Amino acid sequence: MTEHSHNHGHHHHHEHDEDGGEDEHEHFSEEERIAAHVKAGKAARTALDYAKANARVGMKLIDLAKIAEDKIRELGVGIAFPANLSTDNEAAHYTPRFNDPRVIGEKDVLKIDIGTHVDGFIADCAVTVDFSGENGKLLEASKTALESALATVKAGINVREIGRVIEGEIRKRGFKPVENLSGHSLDQYVIHAGITVPNYESGNYVFEEGDSFAIEPFASTGLGRIHEDHAFEEIYGVSALGNVRSPGARKLLENIFLEYKSLPFAKRWLKQDAMLGFQIRELKNAGILDYYPLLTEAKGVLISQHETSIIVEKDGCKILV
Ligand code: MN
Ligand code: MN
């Protein structure tokens, strides 16, 4: 998943004090934390490669999502968020709905963005598949941008420099970086932990040894500015705990928090009960659930994305995926 830096009142920054996250941190040493990230990263690599190898024109997106998510479960790690399968001008946060009829088209530019976690320590990664083979340069732009960023990251480097490198690789191939999507720090059970890695020369944070981050350049044939499409609502997350009146909604929240904590989840993962829509709305209205809107550019635009997660080291970085 990605961090949208100019959201309009929809806070995706899950502060980690309401779920006891700080306390859980204390149970893990630095070595254990890094080992968990590494394990999550290996599983993410296997699942991402497997999903990519199985993606076919004519396949339902829901089937591809299940292939990716089932593989993560089979590998014995947690799913950090629903498989994001965003097509063409959609940059991020499309996950198929329950019984979603959408299929992969022969000219689709499909972003496969998945996440794993071990004890809440996350690996977030993505690759783009170009089914027509006509968009090699666009894919090369985000891929090379990621590679150059990874070759530049180390303790003491400012995120601004990473943004400059990413923007340079994308612009020199004739595309625009998506300016209002960015990489992000990773915290335990928190996918967008507050520090961003812009895809252009911006930001001001100096990497420290041991930091965990996702870096995710997006290259666009359009303006490089996405907007939120609120007509699509499928991915949610608990943003604050609180009380609701109806027992059904209260029970749903209990189950969600037990299973996903503050991590994003899909509505299709829940029991498809007749009351589900009402209960979700009640939790949203109470400020407990937030949703992740679809992030898109204008129709006709094509966007590519490549993403991996890292641990910053003194002289470079450990690439997790
Ligand atoms: Mn992602
Ligand atoms: Mn991400």
Image (spheres, rainbow, N blue to C red):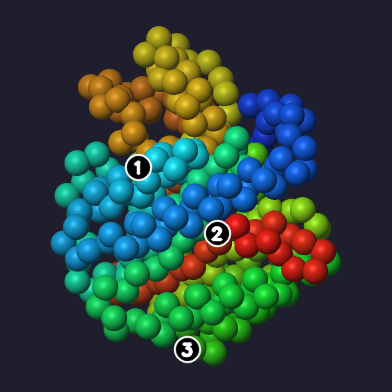
Q: Looking at the image, can residue 68 be seen?
A: yes
Count every numbered label the image shows and give the total: 3
Q: Which class describes the residues within 10 Å of circle 2: few (<14), some (14-19), or many (20+)?
A: many
Q: Residue at x 75, y 44 (%)?
A: 31
Which is nearer the N-term, disc 3 or disc 1?
1
Looking at mark 1, is its residue's CB closer than 8 Å to ligand 1? Answer: no
Q: CA distance from mark 3 to mark 1?
A: 38 Å
Which is nearer the N-term, disc 3 or disc 2?
3
Q: Which class describes the residues within 10 Å of circle 1: few (<14), some (14-19), or many (20+)?
A: few
Question: Taking 50 as reference, is 38 left or right?
Answer: right
Label 1 element class: helix
Question: Taking 228 as reference, is 3 left or right?
Answer: right
Label 2 element class: loop
Relative vertical location of residue 59 with respect to residue 248 in this rendering, above or below: below
Q: Residue at x 22, y 64 (%)?
A: 56
> Residue 194 has which mark?
none
What amino acid type should be assigned to the residue bearing mark 1? Asp
Quadrant, the C terminus: bottom right
Relative vertical location of residue 306 with respect to residue 74 in this rendering, above or below: below
* Tag 1 residue: 70
* Tag 3 residue: 174
Q: Position of residue 227 (x, y in %)?
A: 44, 60
Which is nearer the N-term, disc 1 or disc 2?
1
> Residue 321 has which mark?
2
Relative vertical location of residue 126 with respect to residue 63 in this rendering, above or below: below
Q: Quadrant of residue 132?
A: bottom left
What amino acid type should be assigned to the residue bearing mark 3? Gly
What amino acid type should be assigned to the residue bearing mark 2? Val
